[in-house]
Amino acid sequence: MLGERMGRIPPNVAYLLIAGGAFVFTMQEYHPLLRLETWLAFMLLVVLYRVVVWWFYRLQEEPSNFTLWDNLSFLGSFATTLAWFSIIPLFCDAREPATVYIAGLFLTAVASGGVLTIRTDRRVVLAYPLFLLGGYALWLILQASSGFVALALMVLVYLSFLTITAGQLHREHLKTIRQTERLQRVSQEHARNEQYLSTLIDQVPVGIMKFDREFHITGCNPAYLELFQTSREQLIGLDVLELKDQRPVNVFKQALAGKEGVYEGEYRPTASPIERMFVRAHVVPLANEEGEVEEVLCTVEDLTDSWEKEQKIRNMAFYDPLTGIPNRKLLSERLSQLLSLYRRRWQPGAMFYLDLDNFKDINDQYGHPMGDKLLVEAVQRIRRVLREEDTLARMGGDEFVILLPGVGEDEHSMILQVEKISARIHQQLRQPMELEGICLHTDASIGVVSLDPEASEEELLRRADLAMYRAKENGRGQTQFYDQKLDEQLRERRSLQQAFRLALEQGGLELFFQPILDMKGQVVAAEGLMRWADPERGMVSPEVFIPMAEEMGLIAEVGSRTLEMGCAQLSQWLSNPGMCLQYISLNASPSELATDGYVEHLAHLLAQYRIPPHRLKLEITESVLLKPDSDEVRRLEQIRALGVDLLIDDFGTGYASLEYMARYPFSGLKVDRSFISQLLDDRNTYKLVAAMLAIAEQFGYRVVLEGVENLTILNILRKLVPHSHFQGYVYSPPLPVEAFETRLQQGGLDVSHLDEV
Ligand code: C2E
Ligand code: CA
Ligand code: CA
C-alpha cells in the first residue's frame, strides 16, 4: 500500500504544481503579488519535500522500515492539505465575492482530485475534503450572508456526497489491491510449487518417464537415466511400442486409453549395457481439462536385487548347489508334469536311474573334495549326450535321474534310441578323468524305465531304481531295462529277507562243522560254517544270507551269533577228552569286524567259556579292501592282541595283496577252493598255487587248503605243502554237531596208499 502511495507522488506533485500555478494566476487580480508568491513558495516547498521523500524511497533496493516511510509520506499529504487550507483565510475576501468563488472552485477541485488520487489512505481520504471543504463551508457561514450560507449548504451537501463516494472508492480500491496482491501471491506460490516439483522429480530415486499420445518418449528424470544406464539423447523421441522388450506394452496402451496400470516383471532395457533387470512400473494417464489423455507418466522401481535374492532362494530349493542341475524336488515336478501331459497325449519316453560306479571308493580314498570334482565332471560328460529338452537331476550322493521325453516314434524305436544314449553315456564316463593330476576311472550303472503314464511318479522311480540295482549286480558299467521279472525277483528277495529276519530272531541259525585234517589224515581242527535251516526253502547257504544280512544291516547279529555258538561248542569239546581238536576256526567278514563291540564280545566269550585264545582262529574274507588306519585294521590288531590267530580266507580271490601279509597281523591263509578244484585241469593254476604256498612259507604262515575233494588232489598238495592242513569232501562236508562227532569217532582219513611224502 505504501508502494502504491509512493507511486502516486509524481502525478500528485504535477497536479499540485498546475493547480497552484493556476490559482496564483487567477488570484493576481485581487491580491498583492507578494502574498501570492509567498503562498506559492510554501506550496513549492511542500512539493519539494514530497519529491525528496519519493526520491529516497525509490533509492532503496529493498523497501524497509515501513512506518517511517508511511509517516513521511503522510506528513507530505498533511502539508499539502495545510497549503490548500490556508487559501481560505489568506485569499477569501467577503467584500470581493469573486475571490470566495475562485477559492471555492479550487478547493472543490483539489478536494475531489485528492479523493480520486489518494484514495488508498483512509485517513487522508476523509481528512482532505473534510478539512478543505468543511473549513470553507464554516468560513462561509461565519460571514453571515444569506448567499454565502446557501453556498455553504451546497458545499456541505457536495462534501457529504464526496465523503460517501470517497469511502466507496476507498473500499473498492482496497479490494482491488488485495485481489492483486492475492493474485501475486498465488502466482508466486505456483512458481515455487513448480520449482519444488521439478526438484522433487530430479531428486527422487524412482525413475520417471513420460510419453505422448504418439507413444513417443517426451521426458524423463535423472534417476530413470541412471536406472537404465542410458542418456537423454538416446531416449527422448523413442517409440515405446518399438522397444526391445515388449512386455509392458499392453499396460502402456491401456494407459493411453485412460486406465492406470502396473507392470511387474523381468525387463530388458533398450540402448543400455544392462542385460536384464526386474522392475515395477506404475503407468498413469495424465488428462487435460477436457478429460483427454495427453501424456502418460510411468514411474519405475528397480527390484532387481530382491528379485535376484528370491531367484537364489528358488535355485537353492530346486537345484543342486554342487553341480547346478535340478534336484530331486524339481525332477519330481517335471516328471509329474510330463506324466500328466502323456496321459492326455501319449508319446514314447524314458527315464534313466544312474549310479556312478566306484564313487564310494574314490570318495573314501581321495576325500570328499575329489569326490565332488568327480561328480561335476561326470555331470558335464553326461550332459554332452543329452538334448535341450532332457532333464538331468541329482537325487543325492552319486545317483542321478535322466528324463528323456519324446524318444523314438514307438516303443521299439524308443528302446533302440535309449540303448544308443546309454551307450554314449557309458562311453563318456568310461574315459579316464584327469582330476588334480590323479587319473580316475569310473562308469555308471543305469536302470531304464519306459515312461508309462499309467504308473505313478513314485512307481516309475522305484522301477528305474530297481533296474539300476540289477544293473549294478550284473557287474559295473551296465544298463538294465526294467521288466516285470525284476519285480518278481524283488518280491522273492523281500520274502527271503523277511524269513531270514525271523530266523535270526528265533534261533533258526545253526553252526555246522567241517573237519580240518593234517597230511597224515588226522582230524586236527574244525571250521564252523553257518547254516540257515528254513522250513520252506531247506538249507540256505551262507553265500546267500551273509551278503543279505550285510545289506539289511544285520551282520553284527549274525557275527555275534557265530561267535556265541562257536565258543559254546568249543568249550564243550575242550572239556570232552574224546575230542582232541587243536582249534576251531570261525568266519568273520570285515563288516562284522567293523561293528562296535565285536572285540569286546569276543573277549567276553573267551573269558566266559575259559577258552585259551590260541584254540580259536578267525578267518577273515578278503572280499573287501582293507585300508590302513581303518577301524577294521585296528580291530584286527586288537583281536591279535587277545591271542586269537587271524587267517586270510579265500586267499587269491579278492583284494588281498602281498602287502596285506606284511602289514596286517595275519598268521595264516586259506587257499580258496576255486584254485584247488582247478589244480588238475590247469597248469597255470598249479603254478599259481605253488607260488602262493612259497610266499606263505616265506612269511611263516600256516596254510589250510580248502575244497579238497579227492585223493588225487590231496596227493599233489601233500607234495607241495607237506606241513599244511586241509579240509574238503574227500573226508567230510560240513556237518551238524552230532554227525560231526560221529564222523570223528569213525577215525581219520586213510592216506596209507598215497605216495610217501
Ligand atoms: P568259506 O569260508 O570258503 O567256506 C568254505 C566253503 O566251501 C563252505 O561253503 C563249504 O561248505 C564248502 N566246501 C567245503 N569242502 C568243500 C569241497 O570239498 N568242495 C566244495 N565244492 N565245497 C566245499 P559254505 O558253508 O556254503 O560257506 C560259504 C561261505 O560262507 C564260506 O566260505 C564263508 O565265507 C561264509 N560263511 C560261512 N559261515 C559263516 C559265518 O559264520 N560267518 C561269516 N561271516 N561267513 C560265513
Ligand atoms: Ca572259511
Ligand atoms: Ca573259500
Image (cartoon, rainbow, N blue to C red):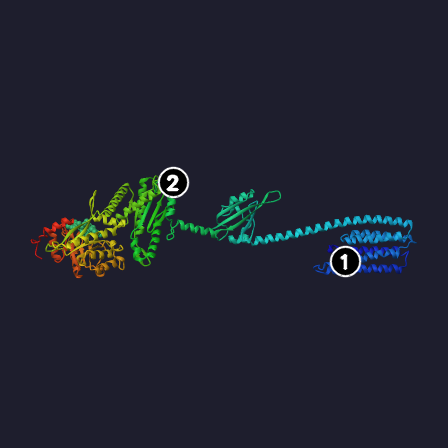
Indicate the position of residue 479 as horizontal and vertical percent values.
29, 46
Pick the residue in front: 345 or 507.
Answer: 507
Task: Using the image as rendered, state which of residue 162 and residue 679 is in the foreground.
Answer: 162
x%, y% of residue 157? 84, 48
Q: Residue at x 84, y 49 (%)?
A: 156
Check mark 2 vs ligand 1: CB closer than 8 Å? yes or no: no
Numbered disc 2: secondary structure: helix
Q: In this orientation, does residue 285 appear?
A: yes
Cα distance in 3D space between marks 1 and 2: 98 Å
Name the residue that disc number 1 marks.
Answer: 73
The reply to whether residue 275 is in sight is: no
Crowding at label 1, few (<14), some or many (≥20) Cα neighbours within 10 Å?
many
Q: Give the residue at mark 2.
A: 340
Sort mark 2 into few (<14), some (14-19) or many (20+) by Cα contacts within 10 Å. some
For label 1, the SS is: helix
84 in relation to 449, above or below: below
Work out which quarter of the rendered image holds the N terminus and state it. bottom right
Residue at x 58% of width, y 53% of height? 200
Q: Nearer the viewer, mark 1 or mark 2?
A: 1
576 relative to 55 in the view: left or right? left
- Position of 647 compared to 480: left or right? left
**Pointer 1 residue Cβ closer than 8 Å to ligand 1:** no
Residue 749: x %, y % from top left: 10, 52
